[in-house]
Image (cartoon, rainbow, N blue to C red):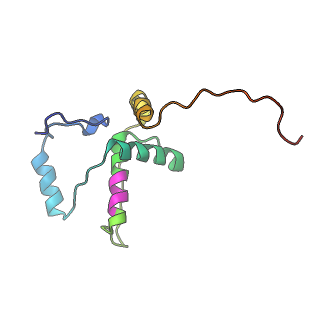
Amino acid sequence: MWKNATTFAAGLRVPKAYGDYLILDIVKTSKGTALAATDDEILDAVRHWASVEGVFAAPEGAAALVAYQKLRASGFFAEKDVVVLFNTGMAYKYLDMMEAKRRTIRPEPLASRTIGGIIGPY
């Protein structure tokens, strides 16, 4: 049991995974691994996929991108390996949480002000 499990990726916030022993057995048998991803890393991955690929992935799917990036940087994959990342949801249901997270990372900008004059070649 993971008491007080917290993450804004609701699909990953599972205090006791159903079939956890099966998942751990598969990871062990396949010589795989498991990684942690912070909320900030997940949010960065959501933004990256949206801006680079046009995929507005749910945080749970974006966690797979975080893991992929970490594993690739560590040399875990061989040249011949084929990697498939699954995203089974969209981030639209997380807009309010993502906005709240953004505000804790980057406070609201100062109020804009009008600068007089006309600029530019015409």
Identify the image quadrant of the N terminus. top left
**Residue 60, percent from left and from top:** 32, 42
Quadrant including the C terminus: top right
Q: Is residue 69 magenta?
A: yes
Residue at the bottom extreme of this rendering: 79
Q: Quadrant of residue 88?
A: top left
Image coordinates for residue 55, horizontal then vertical, percent: 48, 44
- Say whether residue 88 is visible: no
Q: Residue at x 43, y 46 (%)?
A: 44
Residue name at image x 32 percent, y 35 percent: 8
Residue nearest the viewer, comparing 91 with 86: 91
In the rendered image, which quarter is residue 34 located in? bottom left
- How far across and down, in percent of the image, does residue 40 sit? 37, 43
Q: Residue at x 31, y 45 (%)?
A: 38
The residue lying toward the viewer, choosing from 12 and 115, is: 115
Most common SS among magenta residues: helix
Q: How many discs appear?
A: 0
Residue 100 shows in the view? yes
Question: Which one is nearer the viewer's eye here, 110 or 12?
Answer: 110
**Where's residue 79, x and y in %?**
37, 73
Horizontal arrangement in the rendering, residue 101 relative to residue 25 (left or right): right
- The residue segment tinted magenta is 66-71
Which residue ends up furthest to the right in the rendered image? 122
Q: Is residue 38 left or right of residue 98?
A: left
